[in-house]
Image (spheres, coloured by chain):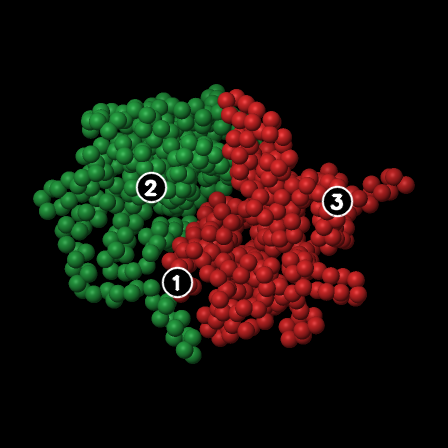
Amino acid sequence: MHLGVIAFLSLYPALHAVLTSSVLGAEAVAVLPDIETMTAVLYFGLFAMSFDFISGYTGYLSFGHAAFYGTGAYFVVLAANGTIPFVPSGTPFMVLLILAGMCALVLALLIGGVSFRLSGVYFAMITLGFSQVLYVFVRGWRYVGSNPRDGVFVTGRSDGFEIGVPFIDQLTVAIGQLTGDEVNGFLGIISLSATEVTYYAIGFVVLLCYFSMQRILNSPFGRIMVAIRENEARTRAIGYDTFRYKLAAFAISGFFAGIAGALFAGVRRSVSPDNSLFFLVTGDALLASILGGFGTLAGPLYGRLFDESVREFLSTGGTGGGLLPYLRGHLPTSVLDADLFGVTVRAAVETFLNGHASLYLGLLFVLFVLYVPNGLLGTIQKRSEGTVTSWLMGWVERRR
Amino acid sequence: MSGVIAWLSHCSVAGVPLTADVLGQFFQFETLVSVFLNGLAKASLYIMIATGLTLIFGLMGVLNFAHGSLTMIGAYLGGTVLTALVASTTGDPARFVLFFGAVVVVFGTLTVFGGLLEVTLIRPLYDRPPIYQILLTFGVTLVLDELARIVVTFYGLQPISDWQAALGTKPDILTRSVTVGSVSVPGLALFEIVFGVVTVLAIHAFLTRTRYGLIVRAGSDDSEMVSALGIDVRRVFTVVFALGVGVAGVAGTLLLWDPNWGASVPLATETLLPAFVVVIVGGLGTFRGTVAAGVLVGLVDSTMTWWFQNAIQFTGLPEMMVFLVLIVTLIVRPQGLFGLAEVGGH
């Protein structure tokens, strides 16, 4: 199953290129998310996974998780501008990635140490409180830039951020749409644009993080996390110091959220309080987790893929496809000018489709909470009484 | 090393040292009274915003994430009524009468809406873990905010900044300051204090003096027992949810005239977060606690606003203080000021 998904994701750019240039090109452009969006899906998916790692597996809703994402993102941008002491602006990105993760980990230990005295709604609220304090603080902190409310850009280095093995140039590629590397004629056949290189490089890091988290969850440590979710009192009664396990899980989750934030900053080369530290960023992770499946590690990635696809499909469509430009371009004028309850179809389309994806996602979200509480992946797992792989294997067995 | 020094110099947030001069200025009678009255005005707004949330949580254990959006809708609805009825020639007394008319309209509409919301969406979730109710109301917020944005854009009412036409319906007397002796207080602040006190008294009377209030209080203590006594708790849930939503709407209408708030789509998150803070600081689900926490947060807010305007330069710190109050309270007293350790299965 994993292999299938990885294969699909690695073939996606080629598939996208083929489909968009085929006969159904216009339809494909409208429906399929483009590669930039897919890159965003990957790093935000990692953040959503790290959110699910703590919230879905230990049952403690960490509503201030954006604090760690933002810490990672700000760390990278500030380090690249040379404003963080002892971290020169030329530090390799891979080192920054780890450092950003460690920063978020330390922050998680501090916040978690205080917050895990509480549970339930109180825990959700105190973590929200911490992240909002950080948000307001960074928004007014002159140190990060001259206009902290609008965020900061990378000005200290003009080269792209490089993902790979530090100090070995052959194994390193720069990411970013404008500054990234291109690959021409690798092995004689593969040529990739900067966007695609970025996609693969980010995908590789996300994959690595995913398998690390997967490994932790399948270890005895991960079993204890689930035990805490199911019944904390009993877990304590059989002798586990649940506070320590919760704190450690929170710290690990913070580490990966920091890495996700660092990747985000690496691709975007800028960060603002509103797209990294604000509590609605956590809300987006929550949305992805619910759609994909709460308490399934890979679920949030699919949830985010779904979320972003719908958003892009319903977006104003400046860059990629989307429904609105498609309808504008392909509906005949007679239909567009037709009268529909007092407004023209054109006006209705412009009003209800112009960047209002949140409305439809919200409706979907409500329906999911009501009728598909386990999410996309969780439902399949529950139906099959096991992982998706075993369900697929069983299906193949039955067909033989 | 120079990097560290630069870092430290930026870290010192206080641009101006705290001098005895500023302290003396703060402890003058006029300053104290005006800070106190402004604090009370803020407090009554905070209490108004948070009360509905508390009522709902206290009885049902549902943390209503859509509360802020409902407040925002209340503000727009009240604004619609006022802008439709108030002309520039309308006198002050008539404006007050129309305002209370708008309050009644908003309360009625949102109470019905809240009832529908509870019956259709929240009711199926009572037997699931409480997290699902949070999630559901979070989804409702997304829908309501986006719908509001569509409607507001469609009618050109500025979704981001305040709705100026609605601000213009404010009676003249509220835009002036009232001077008593050497202290001058904004008229709006006095109006907000009076409105807040009346609402608090009304809700208190409802909870302690009426039969229905008795059932509500009993239900928040032990809803199983109440239903065993033959009372239809489900219906009480619906009524209380509806009332909570109605109060949220009224709070929105009150915010309409305040230049610090005003009707706008982001009002939803701007009010949701302080409402959470007040409810949590007071102790989830206790009305007494909410009032106490509202006063506390309001006074801290106005004091800090004064300090940051006069002594310390750091934008946004009053906003931050609200959350610092939350964090400090939860560290010192995890269940909130008046809360019990376990409420509503949380």
Q: Which residue is mark 3?
A: A22
Which quarter of the rendering shows the N terminus of chain B?
bottom left
The image shows residue B22 at horizontal and vertical percentages of 19, 61
Query: What colour has chain B?
Result: green
Q: Gap between marks 1 and 3, in whole Å?
A: 48 Å
Chain bearing mark 2: B
State the residue at coordinates (20%, 65%). Answer: B19
Q: Which amino acid lies under the numbered mark 2 shown in the image of this protein?
A: Trp
- Are dots 1 and 2 on a single chain? no
Give the secondary structure at mark 3.
loop
**Residue B49 in sight:** no
Q: Which mark is residue A250?
A: none
Instruction: Indicate the chain coloured red by its letter.
Output: A
- Are dots 1 and 3 on a single chain? yes
The image shows residue B277 at horizontal and vertical percentages of 39, 45
Compared with A60, B288 (above or below) is above
Q: Gap between marks 1 and 2, in whole Å?
A: 27 Å
Q: Which residue is mark 2?
A: B261
Compared with A101, B298 (above or below) is above
Compared with A316, A79 (above or below) is below
Q: Badge 3: how crowded within 10 Å, few (<14), some, or many (20+)?
A: few
Give the secondary structure at mark 2.
loop
Q: Which amino acid lies under the numbered mark 1 shown in the image of this protein?
A: Ser
Q: Badge 1: how crowded within 10 Å, few (<14), some, or many (20+)?
A: few
State the residue at coordinates (27%, 26%). Answer: B86
Q: Badge 2: how crowded within 10 Å, few (<14), some, or many (20+)?
A: some
Q: Is residue B230 left or right of residue A378?
A: left
Residue furthest left as drawn: B181
Q: Nearer the viewer, mark 1 or mark 3?
A: 3
Q: Which amino acid lies under the numbered mark 3 shown in the image of this protein?
A: Ser
Q: Which mark is residue A146?
A: 1
